[in-house]
Amino acid sequence: MKARELFQPVGHHPPQPTGFLNQEKAAEMDTPLRPPQDMPLKGVRTNIVQSIRAFHAHDLQEAAAQLGQHFLYANLAQAQTKQDVLESIAAQFTFPPHFGKNFDALYDCMTDPLHKSGPQPGFVVVLEQIPATAKFDKEAREQLLDIFRDAADYWNDRKIAFRCFYSFL
């Protein structure tokens, strides 16, 4: 390319075919500035336990499906005690009948048997409305979330995504 062509006065553009320019502009105008929210997990670390604040459970379920990952959902609004919470999780995650209904058993069900069953594509877990009652106090809530943090670490060591989102009642 000649130097004269590279350095043209500002405002001088080589002529473009009018039809092409209009089609190109029209296509540009139809393109949204922000990508659609079809990937709410883009930018979320692959192994994390965090508040659900910016997300909706159905969007997370769709994202898990798009990624080919397991989606585990538990609504704990009716739970009042540690036993209620563990029973609700076990029922909604379809744990085996021999589930021990304690935090160690919860960790075990979230890790080892799944790992032994073969390659896993990843997990998106939603715990909605974790109770805040006298019988399920702050310490119990933190213990519950620690189980899921430990599970996230377990799967991270195996290079498998494990994202857990939660909300409190």
Image: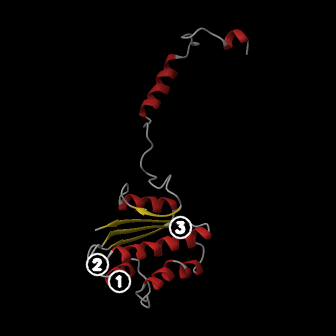
Residue on which disc 1 sits = 87
Q: CA distance from mark 2 to mark 3?
A: 27 Å
Give the total number of marks visible in the rendering: 3
Residue type, mark 1 in image:
Glu
User: Of 25 and 5, which appears nearest the observer?
Assistant: 5
Which of disc 1 and disc 3 is earlier in sequence?
A: 1
Tell me how far mark 1 sits from mark 2, CA to CA. Answer: 9 Å
Residue at 47 percent across and 56 percent down: it is 41
Q: Nearer the viewer, mark 3 or mark 1?
A: 1
How is the structure coloured here?
Answer: secondary structure
Q: Nearer the viewer, residue 58 or 74?
A: 74
Q: Amino acid at mark 2?
A: Ala
Q: Residues within 10 Å of mark 3 (few under 14, many from 20)?
A: many
Q: Which mark is residue 137?
A: none
Q: Earlier in the sequence, mark 1 or mark 2?
A: 2
- Residue, x 52% and y 69% (percent of image)? 152
Quadrant where the C terminus lies?
bottom left
Q: Residue at x 57, y 73 (%)?
A: 154
Percent position of residue 21, x then y: 50, 21
The residue under label 3 is 122
Pointers 1 and 2 in contact (CB under 8 A)?
yes
Which of the 4 image quarters holds residue 75?
bottom left
Quadrant, the N terminus: top right
What percent of the width, then of the height, locates residue 19? 49, 20
Return the disc, 2 or 3, that comes first in the chain's sequence: 2
Q: Pointer 3 and pointer 1: residues touching (CB < 8 Å)? A: no
> How far is the residue under mark 3 from the one under mark 1?
24 Å
The three-letter amino acid code for the residue at tag 3 is Gly
Along the horizontal axis of the image, is 41 left or right of 129? Answer: right
Q: Which mark is residue 79?
A: 2
Which residue is pictured at 47% across the width and 76% down the height? 147
User: At which x and y percent is residue 31?
Assistant: 44, 36
